[in-house]
Image (cartoon, helix red, strand yellow):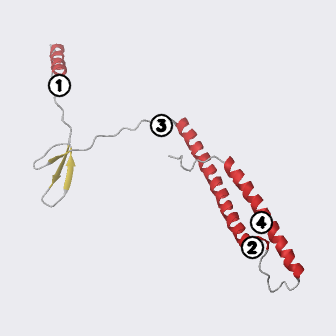
Amino acid sequence: MKANRSLFLFFIFVCFPLPLHAGIYKHVDAQGKVTYSNIPSDHSKRVDLPPIVVVPAIDPHDMEERLAKRRETTKINEQREEIENKISEEEKRLTEIKSEYKDGEPDRLGSERNYQRYLNRVERLKEEISVRERNLDILRNELRNVPDFKNKQP
C-alpha cells in the first residue's frame, strides 16, 4: 500500500510539475532598512536581475602560451622603442653638428686665432657628421629587422 502511494505521488510530481518562480524581492521597512530575500513579503517588490554570464574555462596550457607570447611582444616593443629613441637622439645631434658645420665653413671661434686650430675643428666636425650618419644607417637597419607589434596588440 505504501509503495502504491509513493508511486502515485511520484507520478503526480512528474506529470504535473509545480511552477517554481525563484526571484529576488526587495523590502524597505519604515526605518529605511533594505532587505533582500527570495521569499516575497508584504510591500516587497520583485527585483529583475540581469542574466548570469557564464565564462568558459581557460586552458592553463593555452594561457601560458599567450602570456609567453605577450612577454615576447612586450620585449620586442621595448627594443623597438629604445632603437627609435636612439635614432631620434642621433638625428638631433646630427642636425646640431650640421648647423655648426655650415657646409664646411663654420664660424671661427675666438680661441682659434691659429688658423690650423680652425681647420682641425672643421675636420673633426666633418668626421663627426660622417660617424653620425653611419650610426643612423646602422640603427635604421636594426629597426627594420625588429618586428612591429605596436599596433597589433589586443
Judge whether 56 appears above or below 80 on screen.
above
Indicate the amino acid at tag 1.
Pro
Spatial CA distance of label 3 from label 2 is: 64 Å
Look at 72% across and 58% down and name the residue there.
136
Dot 4 or dot 2: first in sequence order is 2
Task: Quickly name the residue at label 2.
Answer: 102
Quick one: 143 or 38, which is closer to the camera? 143
| Residue 15 found in image quarter | top left
Dot 4 or dot 1: first in sequence order is 1
Quick one: 104 or 25, which is closer to the camera? 104
Task: Quickly name the residue at label 3.
Answer: 58
Dot 3 or dot 4: first in sequence order is 3
Look at 77% across and 76% down and name the residue there.
106
Give the label, 1 or 2, closer to the camera: 2
User: Going by the image, does 135 lie left or right of 70?
Assistant: right
Give the label, 4 or 2, closer to the camera: 2
Give the label, 3 or 4, closer to the camera: 4
User: Going by the image, does 70 lie left or right of 6?
Assistant: right
Task: Quickly name the residue at label 1.
Answer: 17
SS type, badge 2 = helix
Indicate the amino acid at tag 2.
Lys
SS type, badge 1 = loop
Spatial CA distance of label 3 from label 4 is: 56 Å
